[in-house]
Structures are given as structure tokens and as C-alpha cells.
Amino acid sequence: MTGLIGAPLNLIQKRAAKVLIIDDEPNVLSVLYSLLSTIHRCKTATSAVEALEYLREETYDLVLSDIMMPGMSGLELLAEITRFSRDTVVILISGNLNIQSAIEAMRRGAFDYVTKPFDLCDVETAVARALRHQLLVKSNQQYEQHLEDLVGLRTNELTIANTNLNTTLEKLYLNYRATLRALAAALEARDVETKGHSDRVVSYCVRLGKQIGLNHRELITLEHGALLHDIGKIGVPDGILLKRGALTEDEWQYMRRHVEYGAQILRGIDFLEGASEIVAQHHERYDGSGYPSRKEGDQICLGARIFAVADAIDAMTSDRPYRTARSFNDAADELIRCSGAHFDPLVVQAFTEVPLDGWQEIRQLSTEAGLIMKNAKTSVDIRNSVLTMSADQIEEGWAR
């Protein structure tokens, strides 16, 4: 484009262009044709109507037209050319020296304006300027189209790259998640009585998190923390972990260290940083009576406070060797009773806002085939035995 802008006038003049000359005076047509046809491919017309037929058949670089002609005027022809052939430049010719006519012609889209009788050198100069302008406009359009094509190409390449990256990241996340779930399953394999516990607690946590209004990233962190909450039990001997009876005080001290072990295992894994906090605090109590740090209230991370409720739900609604599963109705009563003590009232409220049938459905969907809780076990004897359990017995169900 720089070469075109700075090109000498005679080089522009030597560029052969398609020129349509229109005038109702044969002598004028002859003079203009003789002047321009030595360089350009020229065609003549004696009226605007005739010129329009030519313009519909092919495209011209330049139209040199008289203004005052019988029938359609040059200004009317200009409007038609502007409408369907924007790349064509127009020079108007008239014997009228009125400056207003020139202004009106330029306002309607003419590139230039010459008057009769005209100097042939002036006509050549005007034609050369018009063609240079037309060439620059075309070059600019081609350059803009090239840029649009290039942007489109790069956008498409970036879209494909982004799609591939998202697919890779999704696969990576699914692999991470599968690894975590496999680890949780391996932990549960040590204790068949708690099989499916992690899946159920994760489902309860996610439902509570959604009810409270956690965002997507926070829900993922909550899921990871719930899934790995007992990873520290890797360091607890089977004799203590699988003991059927009540634990001694020394054994409780050892059992409680699984929180410390879990935090140590996850420490330094960036994408599990939030989950590590949940693992480290999942046995803290809202009133500060929990362990290991006796944190209370908002000192406990929200994920751990949510987990405490979810873990208690599963513990109370699951069968244990020392007791039968409680109903979700009874579990709700217990959560409400312990709200503000063991549990965050906000999380308990979120639990009560979800219909109990919804919690039952979540449990069924999260329990492996053959391990679905049998709701038919609601005899009077079972219900009475559940309701007469001490608070310590209830707590033992989720404290391990």
C-alpha cells in the first residue's frame, strides 16, 4: 500500500482501467474516448439508462458522466451507481459553473467534478486521481479482508487449542478424581461395615453445599475433603480401627491421631489444599469441644462444618453392630437438638430445608447394590431401642 500511495501520477495513469463515459453530446464523447482509450478500456453511452444496462452487465472502475442529460440525470445515475456498485468511482461533468452543483455532486458520492469546456490535462489529472483512489480503496478492502481471514483462522486455531486443553484438563481431573475415589475405596475395604460411607457422605456434603450456595470450585473442594476425610486412618492399627467394642482412652488417643495423619498426607498437594483443611478439622465441634485443636464457630472452615453434619447423618442412618439405623426423621431431630453445640446452626438449617424424602433418595443413589438401607425396618422395638440410646452411643457412630 505504501508503494501505491507514493507512486508517481504517470504510473497510476498507465494502469489500464475499465472506464464508462456517458454524455449526450457525441463530440464530447469522442474527445473523451480518444483521450482515455489510449491507456484504458473505455466504453461509451449517450444516456444514463443505456449506461445502467452496461453497469448491470459488468463492473467498471470509473464512470465519467455528464450531469445534465435527457431523462435520468447524472446525479440520479450517481445514486444508482452508489447503491449497487460501491467500488466504482464517479466523476461528473457539467457546463454549469455553479459551485452548489459541485457541492451537491460530492455530497451524493461523486469523487470529483469538472466543468465544460474542460482542459484535457485537467481531465487526465482528475481521472488519474480517481483511479488512484479507487485502487487504494480496493487495496484497503483486500487488506481488511486478509486481516479478517487471518483473525478468523487464528480464532479457529485458538478455539481448537482451547477445546483440546479443556478436554485434557477434564481428563486430568477425572483421573485425579478416580484416583481419589480408588484411595477412599481402599480405605473402606479395611472395614466392610462402613462400605459406601464415603460415597454417601460426599453426596450429602454436595447437597448441603448447594443448599448453602457454594460455588462450583467450593463444591469440588468440599467433595475432595469429604472423600478423603479418613485418609489418616491408614496410620491406625487394625486392632484399634476394627475393634468391635468400646475403645479405651489410650486407643481413643491413637484413633484421634488419624486427623493429624490425614493432614500430613495431603500437605503440599496444591489442588487438595482446601480438602486438607477439611480433613484436619472434620472432628472439630461448633462449641469448641471437638479435636484436635478445639476450634469453635467460624474458626472451623465451612467445609468441615458441612462435613460434620453430613457425617452424622450417615452415621445415624446406617446400621452398626451395636445399634440399628435410625430414620432420617430421627436424625433430623438429633441434628436440631445438637445445633449450636456439635453442629453449625446454618448447616443444620440447610439440612432441614431439604425434604427428608430427598435425603432418603440421595442415600439410595449413593449406596452400592445390595447395601441399600432397608426402610422396612421400622418396628416398634427397633424404634424404641434407637430412641433410648445415650448421647455418647450416638456420638460414637460418627466419631470414628
Image (tube, grey):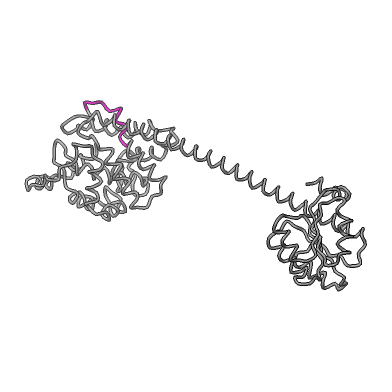
- Look at 80% across and 70% down and name the residue there: 69
Name the residue nearer the viewer: 224 or 146: 146
Q: Majority secondary structure of the magenta segment? A: helix
Marker count (numbered): 0
- Look at 24% across and 33% down and name the residue there: 252
The image shows residue 83 at horizontal and vertical percentages of 68, 63
The image shows residue 161 at horizontal and vertical percentages of 53, 38
Q: Magenta stretch: residue 236 in it? A: yes
Placement of 64 over or under 374, stated as above or below:
below
Placement of 372 over or under 60, stated as above or below:
above
The quadrant in which the C terminus is found is top left
- Look at 81% across and 69% down and name the residue there: 67
- Look at 15% across and 32% down and name the residue there: 245
The image shows residue 255 at horizontal and vertical percentages of 26, 32
Q: Magenta stretch: residue 45 in it? A: no
Indicate left or right for 160 with 60 as reference. left
The image shows residue 91 at horizontal and vertical percentages of 81, 62
Q: In which quarter of the image is residue 64?
A: bottom right
Name the residue nearer the viewer: 205 or 339: 205
Q: Quadrant of residue 28?
A: bottom right
- The boundaries of the magenta stretch are 229-239
Placement of 344 over or under 373, stated as above or below:
below
